Structures are given as C-alpha cells and as structure tokens.
Image (cartoon, grey):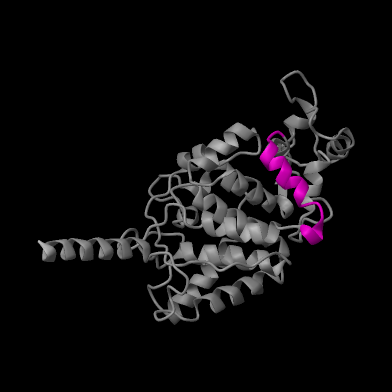
Amino acid sequence: MALLKFLSFLILQLFLVAKCQGVEVGYYKKTCPNVEAIVKETTTHYISRAPTLAAPLLRMHFHDCFVRGCDGSVLLNSTKGNQAEKDAIPNQSLRGFQVIDAAKSTLEKECPGTVSCSDILALAARDAVSLINGPSWTVPLGRRDGRVSILSEASKNLPTPFDNFTTLKTTFGKLGLNVKDLVVLSGGHTIGMSHCFSFSSRLYNFTGKGDMDPNMDKNYIAQLKTKCKLNDVTTIVEMDPGSFKSFDTDYYTMVTKRRGLFASDAALLTNSQTKDYVLSQLNPHGSTFFKDFGESMVKMGKIGVLTGKAGEIRKHCAFRN
C-alpha cells in the first residue's frame, strides 16, 4: 500500500512538472542559449529605423494572447480559403510581421525547429517597448505554436475601442486578468496610432442623434474634427499626442483630462478602482506603471499557452508545418 501511494505521488508530481515545464525562465538555456540576444538584435535593427513599429508589435502580442491564448495564431496567413485571425478588422492594421519573420529565420539557422513563433513574438514585444524608453521584464518561454487561426474568433474575442467598463472587465476576466491588469495594459495606448473610425462616433454621432460624447473634452473634440472628417476611414492620429513614440505615463494624464481617444479609455474613469489607479500614476516619480506593466505582460503571456507535445514549432511563422 505504501508503495502504491508513493508511486501515485510520483506520477502526480511528474504530471505537474510536465504541465508546468512549458513556460519558464531559461527554457532554451541548453537548446538555444542565444535566443533572447538574437530576437533583441533583430528587433533593435527594425525599431532603430522605424520606432513606430513598437506599438503594433506590442498590440500583436496582445491580440495573439486574447484569441486562443498566446500561440502565435495571429501570425498565420489564410490558407485554402479559410480566413485567419490576421484578416479580422482589428488585426488588419497590425504591422511588424517582418520583425518576427527575420528573427525566426536567424533562429532556424542557429537552432532549427526549436524556438516557437509565439515565444519570438513575446520577446519582440518586450524588446520593442524597452527600446522606446519603456520597461523591460523577464519573459517566461516554452510556448508552442497553434495550428488553428480563425477570423471570426478574433472578431468576437478581442476587446474593442467602443467597450464600456463592464464589457472590458468581462472580456479580461474570462482570461484570468483582473481589473488592475485591465487598467495597466490599457496604458499600452501611450504609444501608437489609430484610425479615425475607431473613435469618430464620439465626435459626430455618439448616441445616434448627431451628438458628441459628453465624456470627452470639447476642445479635444474640436482638434480631432480638424483631422477626422465624418466617415473618414483612412486618416490616422496619435493615441497619445506629442508622446506617441515614447513609452511613458502620459496616457494616464490624457485620460484624467478626458482626452483618452477611445470610449474604452474613458471607461477607466467610470470605475473607482481603475480611476484610482489612473490618478495614482500622474506623478512620474511615484508611478508604479512600468513595474506593473511588466507584471501584467508576464501574466497575459501565460494565457492559454500550448506546451509539451501540443501544437508545433513552426518552420515559418506565417504557415503551418
């Protein structure tokens, strides 16, 4: 009986190790020790020439994790008439796929069939943020790549710029992210650009009666109207005016001034917990945003990961093996 108990215990421990071994710091220490250096060198090469790529790389990782987990499915191209996540409207403005492809190409020469595209994306997002004066964080590795990518799932599962707080809380909560993660990760809007159609209803037709959003500063609305005309689907504007190329706390300042670009930004002031966090970040010297952002990114990066023998290690990030 004692032997059976011991064997049962041993089997359970082996199961737990197998289940947890997939995402860990130093995962490639023996199999591909230069992986982080290679991804950083590649990311630096592109960001140094085009700093605006940092925002879409960060957003790409975010969008990947929110659909089927962090499995690199956002990188897949459509095949055999089946449209992939990449083709969904929220993902059509993503850029930076060449960064992932270039890092993958180098890694395939260094250590063939070893490093997943999903891990490369997680590292590139981290490096892109740090390269534009943002925080850095330790990225647990060991994700494997998914074989499925469906347009409709991206359209259904990704948060939208039109969401209110209740919807945002539900969307994040389903993935194990709490209210603090929600307000912290929203801070990623401190970098990047947005098309006018993502917020133009706030300027021209907020409730369907040709009115403006009362939760947005009137002077800011007037400024935006000079750039975004009614039904404009091509113009892009800065999400954090004057600071959109640098990762900082200015986003929270904009939100407190009712100058957050999206309805989802304004929603952060409608909940006491998220509002308190926004206000707490206004003093740059007392801000915890960089530390918090790294912690929430690590947490997000563990959503629905494929490990062990699940999924695959793609040879090319845009195609299944």
Q: Residue 51 placed where, x, y %?
A: 72, 65
Left or right: 92 in relation to 286? left
Q: Is residue 277 magenta?
A: yes
Q: Name the residue: 50% across, 76% down.
A: 35
Q: Name the residue: 50% across, 43% down.
A: 154
Q: Residue furthest front?
A: 2
Q: Which quarter of the image is occupied by the N terminus? A: bottom left
Above or below 258: residue 102: below
Q: Nearer the viewer, residue 186 or 8?
A: 8
Q: Residue furthest top?
A: 209
Q: Nearer the viewer, residue 235 or 253?
A: 253
Q: Name the residue: 69% across, 51% down.
A: 187
Q: Quadrant of residue 161?
A: top right
Q: Is residue 150 magenta?
A: no
Q: Which residues are magenta?
A: 270-286
Q: Residue 135 placed where, x, y %?
A: 67, 65
Left or right: 314 in relation to 232? left
Q: Is residue 86 visible?
A: yes
Q: Is residue 239 visible?
A: no
Q: Residue 111 placed where, x, y %?
A: 41, 79
Left or right: 190 in relation to 24? right
Q: Which quarter of the image is occupied by the C terminus? A: bottom left
Q: Name the residue: 57% across, 55% down.
A: 60
